[in-house]
Amino acid sequence: MISSLLKRAAVAVAGLGVAASVAFAGEATISGAGATFPYPIYAKWADMYQKDTGTKLNYQSIGSGGGIKQVKARTVTFGASDQPLKAEDLDAAGLTQWPQIIGGIVPVVNIDGVNPGDLTLDGAVITKIFLGEIKSWDDAAIKKLNPKVKLPELPIVVAHRSDGSGTTFNFTNYLSKVSADWKSKVGENSAVEWPTGVGAKGNEGVATTVANTKGAIGYVEYAYAKQNKLTYTKLVNHDGKVVAPTSETFQAAAANADWATAPGFYQILTDQPGAKSWPITAASFILLPKQPQDAPIASEALKFFGWAFTSGGKAAEELDYIPLPQTVVALIKKSWAANVKGADGKPLSN
Amino acid sequence: MSDLALAAEPATEVKPKANALTRLALFDRLFHWLTFLAAIIVLLLLAGVIISLIEGSMPAIRAFGFGFLSSQAWNPVTDDYGALPAIYGTVITSMIAMLVAVPVGLGVAVFLTELCPHALRRPIGMAIELLAGIPSIIYGIWGLFVLAPFLQGHVQPALISLFADAPFLSSLFAGPPYGIGVLTAGLILGVMVLPFIASISRDVFETVPPVLKEAAAGVGCTTFEIMNHVVMPYTRTGLIGGIMLGLGRALGETMAVTFVIGNAHKISSSILSPGTTISATIANEFTEAVGDLYTSSLIELGLILFVITFVVLAAARLMLMRIERKAGG
Amino acid sequence: MSLYAGRRANNIVATFLCWAAALFGLAWLIMILGALIYEGAKGLSPAVFTEMTPPPGSAGGLMNAIAGSFLMSAIGVAVGAPLGLLAGTYMAEYGRYAKITTVIRFINDILLSAPSIVVGLFVYTVLVAQMKHFSAIAGSGALAILVIPVVLRTTEDMLLLVPGSLREAAAALGLPRSYVIWHVAYRAAKSGLVTGVLLAIARVSGETAPLLFTSLNNQFWSLDLNAPMASLPVVIFQFALSPYRDWQQLAWTGALLITVTVLILSIAARALSAQRRRG
C-alpha cells in the first residue's frame, strides 16, 4: 500500500519536475561569481534591479579566486575580483576588466571594553601581529600607539582568509608596502602561507570568527564591519596621520588613481599619499569575456552594470562604498563598446 | 477415457498460448539481462570514481611525485602544494574521535545488553540511533555556535593552565584558546561516530550464545568478568570490524569538521590549535582553485582520502564477513 | 582486600562507567537536539515556506532551497533506487552464488561508507567540467550515486530473507523466473524494500558535500535542471558561516527542517521493519 502510494508520488514529482523545467527553461538569469568584498552591494543592486526591471542576477560570493576561475572556464556570465588581472593575463584568457565599485578594508578586533574607533594601529604593528611576533594585546608596541586605551592581557587570535581572496591580495599588498619583512617572508597574493592564525571562508567567515572569538583580529571590507557592528580600528597612513575608515578617507585615497592610462584599468589603491587617505582602499573589478558565448545574457549583464553606474550610487554610499567618478564611468563604457563583441563583431553594449 | 481428456483441447487455443509463452520467455530474458546490467553498473561506478580521481590527479602527481605526501607547503602563489598537514589533521582528528567514541560506544553497548532495565532498553536504543540519524551539517553548526564558544571560554583556558608546567603535555595543550581547532573537531567527530560503534557492538554482543554467558555466571563470574573474559573475546573480530567502520566514517567526514577545524595548513604540536583535514580542504578550496595544478592537487587529496578509507573499510568488511560466516549467517 | 571484594569493586566501577557512558551519549543527543529545536523554532514562520532566500540584511525564507532539495532528492532517488533494486535483485535471485556477486557486495559496501565529497569530485569531473556549468542535474547525479548502495544493500538483504519454499512453490506452478521474482519475492519483501528506499531518502536529504561543487547554489526560485539550484544543506552552509543575524536564524531553521524530515523518514523505516518482524 505504501509502496504504491510512493510510486504514485514519485511519478507526480517527476512529472512536476519535467513540466516545471520546461516552463522555466526559458527564463534567463545573469550568473556571476567571485569576490566577497563587494557582495553586500551587489546583492542589494541585484534585488533593486529585479524590482525595477524583472531581470534576475544570481551572484555567488565564493572569493575572487573562484570568480576568476569560473569566468575563465566560462561557467558564469561574469566574474568579480578585487585582485585585478594584468594585461597579459586578460589577453590570454580573452577577458575584459573594469572597476565597478571602491571600498575600504579595515582591521577589526574583538577586545572587551574597546569600542569601534578606539584602537589605533600602524603598518609595523599590524605586520608583526600577523607574522605572529606580537602575541598579546598588552604588548608594548600596541600600548605605545594607544596610551589612553585599557588593553588587557589577552592572547591575540589572528583570523585570515582560507579561500582565494582579492581582499587578501589588497591587504597583503599593503603589508608588503609597509614592511620589507612581510614582503620577503610572506609576500602578496590572493592566497598566501599565513604564518599564524585561523582561516575562514569569505569576508563573512572572517567577520564571524572575529565576532565569536575573544582577542581576535581580522581584516574585512568596511561594509561587513558596519553591518555587523564589529570593532574597527584606526590606522596610521602613508603621511603619518591617524585616519578612521569613512567614505571621506576612502575617497581621498581613490582620488589619486590614474584610470585612463592603465591597461585593463589596473590600479592598486593601497598606501596612497594624502593626509586623509585610508591606507587599505581597494577597487573591485568585473571580468567579462570579450566574446561571450551567450551574447544576449552578456548584453543583459552590461545593461545591469550600466544601471548600477547611474542608479546604484545612493545604495552604495549607504553601505560606505565609493562609486566611481563619472569621468571614469565614461571611459569604462567606451571600453565596453570597444572590447565586448558578439559573434558578428558588433559591440554588445548599447 | 484418455481420448476424452485429449479431445478437450481444440487446436485453435494452442497458438495464442504459444505466443504468450514466447512473450513470457522474452520478458524473462530481458529482465535477467536488466538486472545483470544494473549490477555491472554498480561495478563500473566504483571503477569510474577511481579512474576519474586518478586522471584528475595526474598533473599533480607528475609535478610533485611522492614528495606530495611529505611536503608541508600549501602555497597557491608559487603553486607548491603538499598533503602532509591535511593527512596529519585527518589522522589526528580521527584518532581523537576514536578515543572518545570507542570506550563510550562499547560502554553504551554493554549498558544496553546487560545493565539496562528491560523497559528502557528500546527507547534508549532508539535514542542512541537517533544520534546516528542527525545529518552531519547539524553537528557542524552546533559545534561552531554552541560547543566552540563553550570550549573557548571555559574548557580550553583551564586545559592550558592545567598543563602549563608539565614537560610534554604543555606543548600538547598550548596556544591561545581559539575555541575551534583540532580538539573540537575530534570531539564532534567522536560524538558522530559513537552511535555506529554502539549499535554494531550491540548487534555483535547479541550474537553470543546465552549458554556461554550463563556458564560463566554459573561459575561465579561478575557481569564485568563475563563481558571481559567471555563476550569480548568471542566477539573480538566483529568489534574490531565495527570500530574500523567507525574509523572509516570519521576519516571521510566533511561537514562536521569543516565548520570547526580552523583551516590552517599547518602541523602544530598543540591539539588546541587550528589545523585542516583532507575533506575540509577540498570543501573550502575546490570552487576557488585557480589553475590546473591547484585543482589537480585537491583531486589528488581526494584520491589519497579515498585510498585511506578504502583500505580501512576493506579491512573492516573482511573482518565482519568472517564473523558473519562464523555465526552461520 | 579479599579477592572477592576486589572483583566486586571492579564490577561496581565498570557498571558505573557503563551507566556514565550511556548518560554521556544521551546528554549529547539532548544538547544537540535541544539547541536545534530552540534556535530553529525561533525562526519558524509561514514566511520560511513562502519566500525566497534573501540578500543579507533583508527578511526572507527558504522556499527555493526547500524546493531545490526536494526536486534533486526526488530525481536522485528516482534514478538511484531502481538501479539499486535491480542490481540487488540480480545479486539475490539470479547470481546468488556467483563470484561476481561477492565482488559487487564488497564494492557496494565500500561505496556505502565512502566519503561523499569524493563522489562530488567524481561528478564534477564527469558532468560539471564537461557541461561547463553547474547544474541541478549534476547535483541529482551525485545524490543518485549515494542512493544506490543503500538501496542495493537492503534489497539484497530483504530478498535473501524470503524463504526459498515460496519461490519453489511458484516455480512448481509453472511461472517463469521473472514472474516468480515480481509476484512472489517482491511481494514478500515489499516492506523491506520500501524501508531501504526510505533510508536512502533520509541519507541524501542531509548530504551537503557532494552538492557544493555540482549544483552550487541559487538565490532565486529556479526549477531549471540545467542551471545551479539552491538546496537546503548548501544554503545552511553558506548562511551559518555568515555574520548576518537573519541568515544565521534561517540556517538554524533550515537545519531543524532537515533534521525533522530525516527523523520522520527513519522512524517510518523503523516502524515498517518492526511491522514486518511482527507480521
Image (cartoon, grey):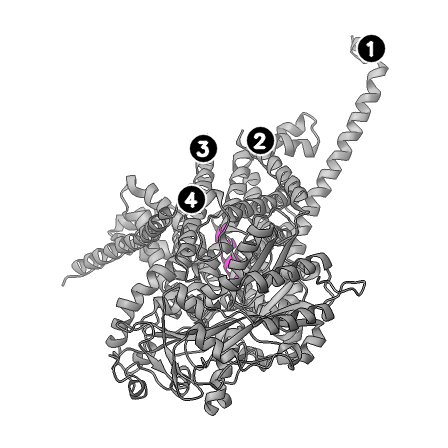
The crowding category of the residue bearing disc 4, from other C-alpha atoms within 10 Å (few below 14, some 14 to 19, many at least 20), is some
- The N terminus of chain B sits in image quarter: top right
Pointers 3 and 4 in contact (C-beta within 8 Å): no
Q: What is the chain identity of the residue bearing mark 4?
A: C
Q: Which residues are magenta?
A: B315-324
Which secondary structure lies at badge 3? helix
Which secondary structure lies at badge 1? helix
Query: Main SS type for the magenta part?
Result: helix
Q: Nearer the viewer, mark 4 or mark 1?
A: 4
Residue B279 % position (x, y): 51, 65
Left or right: residue B150 versus residue C73 is left
Q: Nearer the viewer, mark 1 or mark 2?
A: 2
Q: Residue furthest right?
A: B11
Callouts 2 and 3 on one subunit: no
Q: Circle 3 is placed at which residue position?
A: C275
Q: Type of residue at label 1?
A: Ala
At horizontal 46% and vertical 74% (from top left) the residue drawn is A105
Q: Circle 2 is placed at which residue position?
A: A4
Q: Nearer the viewer, mark 3 or mark 4?
A: 4
Tell me which label, 3 or 4, sits earlier in the chain.
Answer: 4
Q: Type of residue at label 2?
A: Ser
Q: Circle 1 is placed at which residue position?
A: B7
Q: Type of residue at label 3?
A: Gln
Front-lying residue, B182 or B128: B182
The crowding category of the residue bearing disc 1, from other C-alpha atoms within 10 Å (few below 14, some 14 to 19, many at least 20), is few
